[in-house]
Image (cartoon, helix red, strand yellow):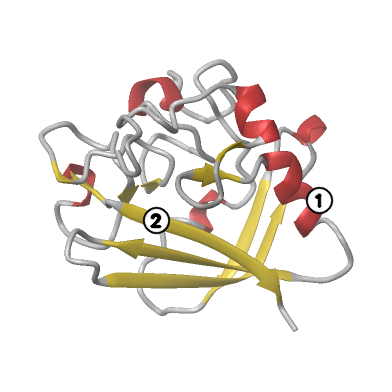
Amino acid sequence: GQYGHNAYYFYRNWTEYANGFGNPADEYWIGNKALHALTSGDEEMVLRIVLSNSTEDSTYFDYKTFTVASEQQLFQLRIGNFSEMTGDPMERLSGQKFTTYDRDNDASAFNCAERLRGAWWYILCDDSNLNGLNLNGHHDSSGDGIVWEGTSSDAAHYSYPKVEMMIRPAK
């Protein structure tokens, strides 16, 4: 992991993801309740995801639509209007509910968060896993790292050392 934390730093339960954890100066999840509060108002919010590899080269993805529903709605994701023409593993997740190892809301026959040791808006445990294990680069396991499908032919076996998710008002 980064900042002295172990690889399992983001393998946490529903309550921790709901309320947030960590330190904003290093590894951090603002909390799904906070994401809901920030994205549920009248003002549209945009999301930028930045993936950085081990040489600090980065790739970013912008979404002009981003909302997270309330806890009663299982923090359902609405995301869209991807800025690029290439394939996008996040837009397919629009409408998905958040899953943790102790709260299975994905469409898979088994719990994706438990299988991939993360927490995310999974469908069938593929596409993306930005809260997966911090395995710092190439690894032998499949899909349990910080994964973004479509960035390489071997994406399931590469864990991004750094990922940032940033939101701001659209205007």
Circle 1 crowding by C-alpha within 10 Å: few under 14, some 14–19, many from 20: some
Q: Is residue 158 above or below residue 110?
A: below
Q: Quadrant of residue 84?
A: bottom left
For badge 1, the amino acid type reads Ala
Q: Which residue is mark 2?
A: 163
Question: Marks 2/1: CA distance?
Answer: 22 Å
Instruction: Tell which residue pokes out farthest to the right in this image.
Output: 42
Q: Is residue 95 above or below residue 86?
A: above
Residue 13 lies, in percent from the top left, at 56, 21
Q: Quadrant of residue 53?
A: bottom left
Q: Is residue 109 above or below residue 124?
A: above
Q: Which residue is mark 1?
A: 37
Circle 1: element type = helix
Residue 61 lies, in percent from the top left, at 44, 70
Q: Residue at x 19, y 59 (%)?
A: 54
Q: Quadrant of residue 32?
A: top right
Sequence-wise, which precedes: disc 2 or disc 1? 1
Considering depth in this image, is 94 or 117 the residue closer to the camera?
117
Q: Is residue 74 left or right of residue 154?
A: right
For badge 2, the amino acid type reads Val
